[in-house]
Image: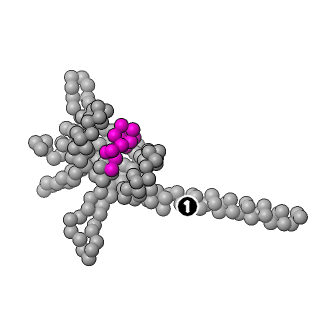
Amino acid sequence: NCAPRGERAHWVLNVQVGTQSISPLMWAIQTGSLEASKAIVIDLLTIRADRDNYYFGADYLFERHPDILKRLSLDAPGLLNTFLDGFIWRSRNSIDGYRRVNYWIKHFLVDADGNFSQNIEWLANFEDPKLICHPVAGMAVDLVWNNVAFRTFLLGKTWFLFTTLIFICSQCILT
C-alpha cells in the first residue's frame, strides 16, 4: 500500500538482492505459496488511477515474465482463473440491463516482438475446457478465428472441395 501507483508493478516483479534480480511472483509460484501468488496477481492486475494516469501492471508483467501463462499452468493451475479474471474490467454502472466490459487481450495475441503469442497455445495445451471457455480466452480465440484463421480455413476447404469435385467428374466421364 505504500508503493507509488506507477511503481507498484516494478516493486512486485523485481527485487534486487545483491547482484541478482528476483521476482517475488515467480518465487512465490515456484515455492508453492499460492496465497501470496494470488495476492500479487490480484494486485498487479488491478486498475488504479490518479488525476493524470491509469495504472495496470499487465504490460510490465508480460515484459518481465513473457511465459507467465505457461508457468502458471505448470506450477500453479489454481491461479489461472484469477489471472484471467484480471484482464476483464466490468463497469459498476448498468444501462438498460447491460454492463460495459473491457477485455485486455493484447498479450494473449501478440508477444513483445510483434509475433503471434504462444499464450493461446499454452491455454489449449492445458486441456481444461472450463479454462478455455473463460471470457478472456474466448474473446482472444474468437478474434483470431474471425479475423485471421477463418478465411485461410475456408480457402483450404474450398480448394479441397474443388479438387474433389474435379475428381468425381473425371471418374464419371471415365466410367
Query: How busy is the neighbourhood of tag 1: few (under 14 within 10 Å), some, or many (20 plus)?
Result: few
Per the picture, the main secondary structure of the magenta-coloured stretch is helix
Q: Quadrant of residue 73?
A: top left
Magenta-colored stretch includes residue 143: no
Which one is nearer the viewer's eye here, 152 or 171?
171
Query: What residue range appears in magenta?
Result: 68-81
- The residue type indicated by label 1 comes to Arg
Q: Quadrant of residue 104?
A: bottom left
Q: Is residue 58 above or below residue 14?
A: below
On screen, residue 165 versus residue 40, left or right, reads: right
Circle count:
1
Which residue extends farthest top?
Answer: 18
Name the residue at 58% across, 58% down: 153
In the picture, the quarter occupied by the N terminus is: top left
Scheme of colours in the image = one colour
Which residue extends farthest bottom?
Answer: 96
The answer to whether residue 69 is seen in the rendering is yes
In the picture, the quarter occupied by the C terminus is: bottom right
- SS at mark 1 in the image: helix
